[in-house]
Image (spheres, rainbow, N blue to C red):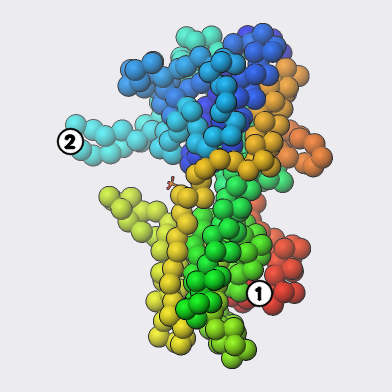
Amino acid sequence: MHVKKIAITTGGGDAPGLNGVIRAVTLAATKRGWECVGIREGFDGMLHSEQFEDGGIVALTPNSVRGIAHTGGTILGTTNRGNPFSYKVTNADGSVETQDISDRLVDGFAAHKIDALIAIGGDGTMDIACQVAKLGIKVIGVPKTIDNDLDGTVATFGFDTAVSYATDAIGRLHSTASSHNRVMIVEVMGRYAGWIALEAGLAGSADVILIPEIPFDITKVVEKIERRNRNNRRFSIISIAEGAMPIGGEASYKETGGVKNLGGVADRVADTLRPVVENQVRTVVLGHLLRGGSPTSRDRLLSLRFGAAAVRALEDGCVDVMVGLDPPTVRYIPLQQATERMKTVPLDCDMILTARDLGTCLGD
Ligand code: F6P
C-alpha cells in the first residue's frame, strides 16, 4: 500500500503505554519516509478543530516524541465522549442529543491528505475504528486498556502496570490489617472483567477475590473471615473488582454531576460485613491511581511492539485489523472480530484454579 501520511488517535480512558505506542508509530513511520500527525483528544481535534489552539492536528516527529515512552497518560489527550457516530451535542435550550458527525472525519482526512489512521484504544475505540473503516478510511487498531478485557490479544498494555500497582497496594495493607485485626477491602478497576482483581489479589496474597465473572455469596466471604479469625489470622484482605456483584444483584454505581460511573462495591460489601463480623472493616479504592504513573517495562515493551507492528501492517497493505499479542509474536486480527466479544476471566483458567488450590475465597 502506498502511504505518505498517517494519523494517530488515542481514545477512551488513558492507560500507561499510550505514549510508547505514539513514539514507536512516529519513529517507524518516519523511518519509512511517511509523515505522521496526532489528532488531539480522541477525534475532537478533527471534529472540532476550531476549539484547539493548534488546530487539533499536530505534527509528530522524532523530536516531538523524544523521551515519552516511560511517561503515563497520552501526549495527545483523550476523551471517552467523542464518538463521531453518536456525538453528544447540547442544544440552545440545554437539551442534549446525539448526532452522527462522522462525515467531518471523512472531510478532515481528505483535507489533511491522511492515508490511514492508527486508533489506539479499548473496546469503545475499536468499535468506532470498525465504523470508521466502513467509511473508507484505512484503519489499524492498537488495543489498550488496564482492564485487559479486549479479545484478540493475550494482553493489552497498561494492564501490567495496573496489576503491579494494585499488588503493591494489597501488599502494603497486610501489615496495617494485621496490626488492627481488620478486614481491608481493596476495590480495583475492572468493569466487566476481573483480571486486575484476580491477578493482583493472587500476587498480593488476598484472602478473598471477588470478580464480575463470579457473582458472590456474601455468606462465603463471612465464613472465610471467621475461619481465619478462629485460626488466629485475625485479619483478612479482600481484592474486589468494581464490577463485582452479589448473586442475583447488580453492579454498584455512583452518580456524580448527573453521570453514573461504576464504583462503591467495596463500601457496599463493607456495610454488609460490619454487622456480622467481629473485625473492623475498612475500604480502599484504588480507582484512577491504577491508570496513572510510568508504565512497567513489560507495558513499555508491549506498547513499542504494538506501535511498530501497526506501521508494518500498513506497509504490508494489511488494513482494518487490530494488532494483538500472540506470544512470542504479534499478529493481526480483523477489527470486526476484535470487537465481537469481551475477554473475561474463564472460570476454568489456571489462575482461578490456582486461587482455589490456595484456599482463596472467590465468593462462591
Ligand atoms: O476501561 C477502563 C476503566 O478503567 C474501567 O475499569 C473504569 O470503569 C473506567 O475506565 C473509568 O473510566 P473514566 O472514569 O475515565 O470514565
Q: Of residues 232 and 328, which is closer to you in this image?
A: 232
Determine which of the numbered discs, if any, sits on residue 93 in the image.
Answer: 2
Contact (CB < 8 A) between labels 1 and 2? no
- Name the residue tied to disc 1: 360
Which of the two labelled residues, at mark 1 and mark 2, occupies the earlier sequence position? Answer: 2
Q: Of residues 71 and 53, which is closer to you in this image?
A: 71
Q: Quadrant of residue 194?
A: bottom right
**Dot 1 alpha-carbon crowd within 10 angstroms: few under 14, some 14 to 19, many 20 or more:** many
| Residue found farthest to the right | 328
The answer to whether 93 appears left or right of 81 in the picture is left
Residue type, mark 2 in image? Asp
Residue type, mark 1 in image? Thr
**150 over 204 or under it: above or below:** above
Instruction: Pinpoint residue 50: horizontal percent, then vertical percent.
Output: 33, 17
Label 1 near ligand 1 (CB < 8 Å): no
Question: Which image quarter holds the N terminus?
Answer: top right
| Residue found farthest to the left | 93
Asked if residue 336 can be seen in this view, the reply is: no
